[in-house]
Amino acid sequence: MKDFLSSLENRVLVCDGAMGTMLYSKGVFISRCFDEMNISNPHLVGEVHADYIKAGVDIIETNTFGGNRTRLMPHGLAELTRDINLAGARIAREAAGDNVFVAGAIGPLGIRIEPWGKIAKDEARAVFREQAEALLEGGVDIFILETFSDLNEVEAAILAVRDITDKPIVVQMTIEEDGNSLEGTPPEIFAKKLEGWGADVLGLNCSVGPQTMLDGIERIASVTSKALSVQPNAGKPKNVDGRNIYLCSPEYMASYAKKFVEQGVRIVGGCCGTTPLHIKAMRAAIRSMGMRKFGDARSQSTPAATAGAVHDRASSDFPPIPLAEKSRFARKLSKGQFVKMVDMIPPQGHDYAEVLDTAKRLESEDVDVITVPEVPRSSARMNATSLAMLLEKFTGMESLAPYACGDRNLLGMQSDLLGAYALGLRNLLLITGDPPHVGDYPDATAVYDVDSIGLTNMVYRLNQGIDVGGKSIGKPTGFLIGVGANPILINNDDQELKRFQYKVEAGAEFVLTQPVFDPAALEGFLKRVEHFKLPVIVGILPLASYKVAEFLNNEVPGCSVPASIVDRLRLSDSPDAARAEGIRIAQEILEEVRGMVQGVQIRGPFADYETAMEVLSVLNLKGASL
């Protein structure tokens, strides 16, 4: 067989279309793991390859797009990773014979990697390498890394393949309707990155139809001399009687195949919704254009001077906002002043008049910041961010809003926070959050795209004037970035300490602890994290009764109330006596730890602000600092 890259010099190669669409059309349920069919039904997979070869393709892709360990794990197939990929490569190799190239298909992991997720780049690289090794053993000629949107992840995939072979790599990103990647990175930027990491062919696939993809490929062509590849969807799917039907006709796809070639594309194929009929029409249209040498179309496109006008703006034109200028809260932290904080639960419904009155009263009592806790998302309460912005707008109080990762993807969170900043929100507590397992709507579910580490990375970038995709946003945001920590867990678990370190490295500027009932535990925590040099604000929860203490000890993970405190509450002979004892305990803890930390947050009992003020009264520090 001819060398793949040499073949691209002399003609346009036609790649196959969708594997999943064809298996679906042959009666395979969409919930099945298509990659596993390389083992359970290799004949059917081979049938699809044969259909595309009959349509006249030059390249077929292995049925291994989701064949990496992390994607196979939810199906209970992680231990079959090698077998699935090896079988996929061998099925394609047998179908292809000596006249068709076999491309080892590798898709994303299906989970976030750093800086957004928990998987380190080296771990991701190892997962991709495991898949690539099996594909190489099975006899693939090239590798196609496709449908990527995260540059960190695709870099790991490219390096993984390069770890084991110098065979050609085709890298295809996926884009939105605006032409940028799903992470918001412009083609002009990601094309140069892919080229620098060692991709032999650059391209686009999936997510959009041929019209949007043509615009994207023109932008890539303006900044690179590498060969290009495109595999668009057959338009957007329409749901007809419960089935996704793609509406682009073979003739329409064929018309765009010619336009792609006119832009210098050397590999043309299809993605979701494309069938052998589409590919056959596209092949015929390309062949009708005659033999075209590589670079023929490129020489008539965007001149080099224009290409050089696009810059990788990995930095902002504006300096970051200094800590002391972000908010009054931030200024206090920067000066080492002690901060007093009180929780305020968001109201049910949309009427916020009463909470504004309460906020003004807390201000008169010398409270510095109102923290607005996250409430169960399955109950009809105002969200924390909205209440925080209302407090900023209508009172003299500053607020601290927790922002959790549940039910929002990374780009959605980025949009939320840019809007919140424009409306005046400045202080954030970034948390992963808990699934909504209680509330008025027990069927509510949560979705987590990233955790608090990835979220901290994202907000830090906004503070540098850079978005998730690496583009400048103009003026940077000036969020004060807070993160949470559980002293008990960090004292006893090195992995939790490591997660805390990652939050600091991601850009955290202060830490707020979970409620502390044992000053010795707080002291141990402070010793373990003292080298990070972050201001620490301690959470204190006045216990209302023995029953509450018992619940925290037995039903709240990571919470521990010392036996001595439990015994004191058990001896209280009435609710009023228990409340008074709980306040005394909280005051004693506060007096013991106040010299260790830079602030205190009094948490709950919700709407009982008299309790919070009684606890704070022992400070007797109105207007003073520690």
Image (cartoon, grey):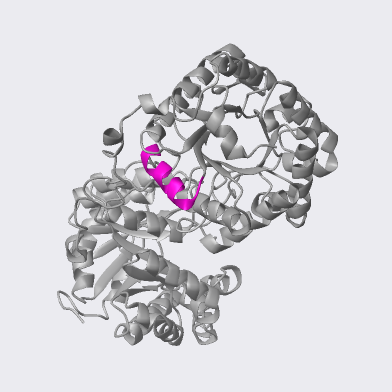
> Would you say residue 501 sits in the magenta stretch?
no
**Quadrant, the C terminus:** bottom left
105 and 613: which is toward the camera:
105
> Would you say residue 196 sits in the magenta stretch?
yes
- Residue 563 in view in this figure: yes
Q: Position of residue 136 (x, y in %)?
A: 70, 50
Figure check: 87 above or below 576: above
Q: Position of residue 208 (x, y in %)?
A: 50, 28
Give the magenta part as a residue range. 187-199
528 and 613: which is toward the camera:
528
Q: How many marks?
A: 0
Question: Magenta residues: mostly which secondary structure?
Answer: helix
| Residue farthest to the left, as pictured | 623
* Residue at image coords 74%, 44%: 89
Figure check: 424 above or below 122: above
Relative to 273, 176 lies left or right: left
Quadrant in the picture for residue 580 = bottom left
* Residue at image coords 36%, 81%: 531
- Residue 449 in view in this figure: no
Q: Position of residue 525 (x, y in %)?
A: 43, 81
Relative to 309, 263 lies left or right: right
97 and 324: which is toward the camera:
97
Q: Position of residue 211 (x, y in %)?
A: 46, 21
101 and 177: which is toward the camera:
101
**Quadrant, the N terminus:** top right
Quadrant in the picture for residue 311 = top left
